[in-house]
Image: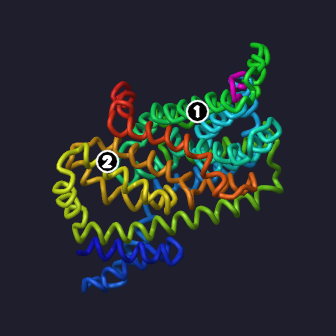
Amino acid sequence: MLIMILTALFLAATVLGIPLLYALLLATLGTIQASGLEYSNSIIFHAFAGGVEPAHFLAIPLFITAGEVLSRGGVGNRIIEFAGSLFGWLPGGLAVVTVISSMLFGAVSGSAIAGAAAIGSVMIPGMAKRGYAKSYSAALVAVSGTLGVIIPPSISLLVYGFVANVSVKDLFLAGVIPGTLFGASLVAICVWQGKRMGIEIKGKVTSFGEVWRSFVRCIPALLMPGVILGGIWSGVFTPTEAAAVAVIYGLAVSMWVEKGLAWRDLPKLLLEAFTTNAVVMLVIAATAALAWLVTVEQVSQQLVVVLEQVAGNALIYLLLLNLILLLIGVFLEPLPALLLTAPLFLPTALAFDIHPVHFGLIITCNLAIGLFTPPVGGTLFVSSRIAKVGIGGISKKLIPFFGASMIVMLLVTYVPGLSLWLVELFG
């Protein structure tokens, strides 16, 4: 009964356009009143404030700030140049370069929105000059930008690790193969469509010298994921310390190597990053209050019983889980969606003997797909603004990319080894 009231209130608030922060609080307080529960407002306030008290949560705003710095600092241009020297000769070469650049930038920034903005602002106009339709370019940027949610160091995987008490190091290892598979599937679509559209069929193969020179120029940017992930995996620093290193390293590269940022740019950049972080942390706090109510009222245990009766086995449960997560991902950004769903569904996943690391990848990949799913996907909105194309026009071009992503999503869901092989290898 309580889960039905909670869901109805939250959905009603969302449909009415109430901001997510207030929708979460309304669902929490409204459920308490409607169910006749005797919890004081002070308890809810303590749960709200306690949601952002853990020190390791500092990693979230720091990684978000690092992504903002890198997206403004010219790092994307170097990455695009290097990816072009390696893959620009393929059919649909510039489209392939967009995907590879997004993968590399995702590994540097960990942010889907930052990746879509940084890569899209360069590649969409460039692809238009080569004869690509703007709607196609925008669709490709919207999809490939979400690779930053899956490829480590992913902010979403970091948050899931904190919420679910799962090793961040293991989650980052688990994201490598799924992220590569998503990227490879997009590259295959780009090559096929390049041939079909007759664009860039016979590209010029770049000489080794040119590849080497572009690689050398890109080394400062490419070193960043190595420094962050290497430090975490080797135990030199924690994920929170790694986030601080990412900000300092990103500032150094953007200001003194790429020279894309100046001191005068920092106040505005930091203010915008602070605004984004404030919204994220308030949503985390509101989700913590909701998670507290769900926990004390044993909603997760009730959900386990219901799903065991409905699903019957792990295969059906995983199918239902994917459908639910895809639906949630359409309307919510990955971080609040993850904070909402992880505490709720993790007990049910454990009841079906699903590894918590594998479960984290299932959630993350589904929410990444939601980012480019019409009508309200985050990267879809960014690419639409850059290309100045309506969501309807982009949506038609999304169909093959969406199909390929769903195939990979099913592989990640039903082949746990894709997520766990590296974890077990280095475990």
SS assignment at label 2:
helix
Asked if residue 329 is positioned above or below residue 360 in the image, the reply reads below
Report if residue 98 lies within the magenta region: no
Q: Which residue is drawn at 83% across and 56% down?
A: 264
From the top left corner, tell me how far across and down residue 320 is, in percent. 31, 52
Check the picture and name the quadrant holding the C terminus: top left
Residue 90 appears anywhere in the view? yes
Q: Which residue is drawn at 36% across and 28% down?
A: 421
Report if residue 90 lies within the magenta region: yes
Say left or right for 36 vs 44.
left
Residue 235 appears anywhere in the view? no
From the top left corner, tell me how far across and down residue 374 is, in percent. 56, 57
Q: Distance between the residues labelled 1 and 2?
A: 25 Å
* The magenta segment: 88-93
Badge 2: few (under 14), some or many (20 or more) residues near its Cα, within 10 Å? some
Which of the two residues, 133 or 406, is positioned nearer the viewer here? Answer: 133
Q: Residue at x 47, y 61 (%)?
A: 336
Say left or right for 345 vs 141.
left
Q: Which residue is drawn at 64% across and 42% down?
A: 140
From the top left corner, tell me how far across and down residue 64 is, in percent. 60, 53
Which of the two residues, 179 or 261, is positioned nearer the viewer here? Answer: 179
Q: Which residue lies furthest to the top in this view?
A: 208
Check the picture and name the quadrant holding the N terminus: bottom left
Quarter assignment of residue 294:
bottom left
Q: Return the disc, 1 or 2, that comes first in the chain's sequence.
A: 1
Q: How many labels, in total? A: 2
Q: What residue type is labelled 1?
A: Ile
- What colour-coding does the image apply? rainbow
Q: Name the residue under label 2.
A: 319
- Tell me if label 1 and label 2 are in contact, CB under 8 Å: no
Q: Name the residue under label 1.
A: 189
